[in-house]
Image: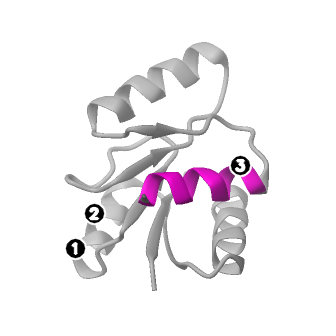
Amino acid sequence: MTRIMVIETEARARQALKAILEGAGYEVIIAADSGDAITRHSVHPADLVIADGVGEPPAGARILAVPGGTDQRRAQLSERLRLSGAKNFLPKPFRRDDLLDAVRASLA
């Protein structure tokens, strides 16, 4: 089963992403911040990390960036994630189907 780690600072968004991804058949690990993510990733490596850009994702992980906020903030977070290795971006807000399409593209 494909394992996805969600790094999201907002508790409601974390739970919503978890529900959507589990509903699509993925195993999901959630983390509130980059420290928690690095610890969890070392124990349970993920096939994909979905990161909101507030913290640093685990090194060497395949990353789907989901930055939020104003256009300027989204651009800053996107740049930080790009430098961390993100190749796929899905700015918030997004629809369920857009998320699942982005996940599939990121895993391909």
Give the main secondary structure of the magenta stretch.
helix
Q: Is residue 67 above or below residue 70?
A: below
Between the residue at mark 2 and the residue at mark 3, the CA separation in whole angstroms equals: 27 Å
What's the residue type where badge 2 is placed?
Ile
Query: What residue occupies the far top of the structure in this picture?
Result: 72
Quarter residue 84 falls in = top left
Report which residue position mark 1 lands on: 42
Q: Is residue 2 above or below residue 66?
A: below
Q: Write the start and end of the magenta stretch as one range.
A: 97-107
Q: Answer yes or no: is residue 10 visible.
A: no
Q: In the rendered structure, find residue 75 and report the number of the disc placed on it.
A: none
Residue 54 percent across, percent down from the top left: 46, 39
Label 3 environment density (alpha carbons within 10 Å; few <14, some 14–19, many ≥20): few
Q: Answer yes or no: is residue 82 visible.
A: yes
Report which residue position mark 2 lands on: 38
Report which residue position mark 3 lands on: 98
Query: What residue occupies the far bottom of the structure in this picture?
Result: 1
Between the residue at mark 3 and the residue at mark 1, the CA separation in whole angstroms equals: 29 Å
Disc with the residue nearer the chain's start (2 vs 3)? 2
As helix, strand or loop, the secondary structure at mark 3 comes to helix
Residue 83 percent across, percent down from the top left: 28, 30
What's the residue type where badge 1 is placed?
Ser
Locate the N terminus and report the quarter of the image it occupies.
Answer: bottom left
As helix, strand or loop, the secondary structure at mark 2 comes to helix
Which dot, 3 or 1, sits closer to the camera? 3
Q: Is residue 60 above or below residue 17?
A: above
Residue at point 76% right, 55% down?
A: 97
What's the residue type where badge 3 is placed?
Asp
Label 1 environment density (alpha carbons within 10 Å; few <14, some 14–19, many ≥20): few
Residue at point 69% right, 56% down?
A: 13
